Amino acid sequence: MKQVNKKPGKQEPRWQTKISGGNFVDKFHAYRNLHAHALFSSLGRLVASRFSSAMTITVLAIAISLASGFYILVANLQQLAGNLEASNQISLFLKDEISEARANKFANTIRQNPDIQDVKVITKEQALAEFQTYSGFGDAVKALEKNPLPVVIQVLPKNSLKNELVLETLLDDFKRSTEVDFAQMDMQWVKRLQSIMDVARCGVTILSLLLGAGVLFITANTIRLELHNRRDEVVIAKLVGATNSFIHRPFLYGGFWIGFFSGVAAWFIVTTIMLILKQPIERLSGLYDDGFHVLFLGFTETLALLVISSVLGVVGSWIVLHFQLRQLKPE
């Protein structure tokens, strides 16, 4: 009899584990089904009121597309600035007595500087040939007995549009070099371009914050109206003991769908505008022999656009629900 009593005792923990495991799985499936029902029922309500939903989504899409459009505009300007950076060189006019061999040695020394991207040596003969070609005084130059042009070294600094202090330090160092007779660079042009890019980035940030706040409030007002229309349903749910999280769920998913579809519509608006502008811009770029190509929203930017718009929809819904449900009490 003692042996018979021991066997059930050994099996009891296994039986309890199976039951508890089953409870966890059942709770997980029930939780999943509730969220799936709220997700698709909120989508059904959105589809049922097509006109009002389309109006709300269109307004939000325009707001989001404005922020996204300015972002992609700044991205294209930064690409253009990167192309202009290649023309932002420091020209070093060497002294007349400096030979080509010494000029090449001096250029090799410059290349060892970590702040230098590229160095190009223009010999006297090359400088004279370019002057004859582009100046229009080719016949007058041929009459000269001696080549009056010096050896020129063109220096392209790294990140010349981002670090003005490094540029000024380099220019001062070159001016103090014994080989250099004159060093030239348009620092004013660099400062202006830096200021323009800083203003553009700051403007995009401010505009995005303002438009994001607008999306937040429009979504909140839409959910507030939906909550008002379903007031009786919410009151009955509270009377039968429904928790706030249970009541929140379909409205939060409604805000998610509104934000998500607004983000998708905004992506189509921005992409369509960029497609319309692509050919004229690239045609204009080709006239200046520039390899400029219009940038579109990439995969990462598109994903961020959809996530941010969806999160704004959910946050706007939560804010209005958090305050409205406190005031909505069953009588």
Image (cartoon, helix red, strand yellow):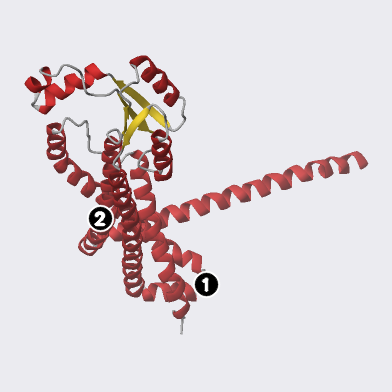
Nearer to us in this view, 31 or 104: 104
Q: Where does residue 14 sit, x and y in percent of width and height? A: 74, 42
Residue 26 visible in the snapshot: yes
289, above or below 312, in the image: above
On screen, residue 232 versus residue 272, left or right, reads right
Label of residue 124 in the image: none
On screen, residue 53 versus residue 23, left or right, reads left
Q: Nearer the viewer, mark 1 or mark 2?
A: 2
Quadrant into which the N terminus falls: top right
Residue at image point 12% right, 39% down: 280
Nearer to us in this view, 207 or 48: 207
Furthest residue to the front? Answer: 145
Q: Which is more N-terminal, label 2 or label 1?
A: 2
Residue at image point 33% right, 26% down: 95
Residue assigned mark 2: 66
Element carrying mark 1? loop
Q: Where does residue 210 sit, x and y in percent of width and height? A: 33, 63
The amino acid at mark 2 is Leu
Residue assigned mark 1: 241
